Image (cartoon, rainbow, N blue to C red):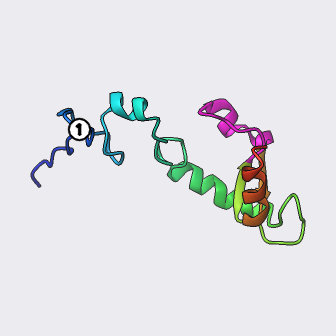
Amino acid sequence: MPYKPRPECRYLGCNKRAIKGSGFCKEHQAMLNIRPSSVERGYNYKWNKYRKEYLKRHPYCAICHTRIATVVDHIIPHRGNKDLFWDKNNHQALCIYCHNRKTANGK
């Protein structure tokens, strides 16, 4: 298969190559403060496999204790810290309702 080059940065006048999935080069992505993709933030195949196993072991929401958990939440937001991201003591199983409420409150 022939190689297909990445598209150019979408920033007006920039002719650098864009980061895969973002549409912008590194310089303009940082300048525009665009959130990296979920894979770039660490939510990749390895995380999905871990998440599936974690939810099997913790099927109910840790907050309401009544609904089925669908999200593995980071109790303390990791903000890109890989050690905190993978710290098993920093994870809890939450239903989508409790997770959205917790996230909206910024806690």
User: From the image, which quarter does the C terminus lie in?
Assistant: top right
Coordinates of residue 12 in the picture (x, y in percent) = 23, 38
Residue 80 versus residue 107 in the image, above or below = above
Q: Amino acid at mark 1?
A: Leu
Label count reads 1
- The one nearer the camera, 17 or 28, is 28
Residue at 70%, 59% (x, y): give it. Answer: 71
Residue at 65%, 56% (x, y): give it. Answer: 51
Residue 68 versus residue 80 in the image, above or below = below
Coordinates of residue 26 in the picture (x, y in percent) = 34, 31
Residue at 42%, 35% (x, y): give it. Answer: 32
Quadrant assignment, res 68: bottom right
Q: Residue furthest bottom?
A: 67
Residue at 90%, 66% (x, y): give it. Answer: 65
Quadrant assignment, res 52: bottom right
**Mark 1, residue position:** 12
Q: Residue furthest left?
A: 2
Looking at the image, residue 14 sits to the left or right of residue 51; the answer is left
Asked whether residue 75 is drawn in magenta, I would say yes
Looking at the image, residue 107 sits to the left or right of residue 15; the answer is right
Coordinates of residue 92 in the picture (x, y in percent) = 79, 51
- The one nearer the camera, 62 or 35, is 35
- Residue extent of the magenta highlight: 74-90
Residue 84 versus residue 106 in the image, above or below = above
Q: At numbered mark 1, what does the secondary structure look like: helix, strand or loop?
A: loop
Dot 1 surroundings within 10 Å: few (below 14), some, or many (20 or more)? few
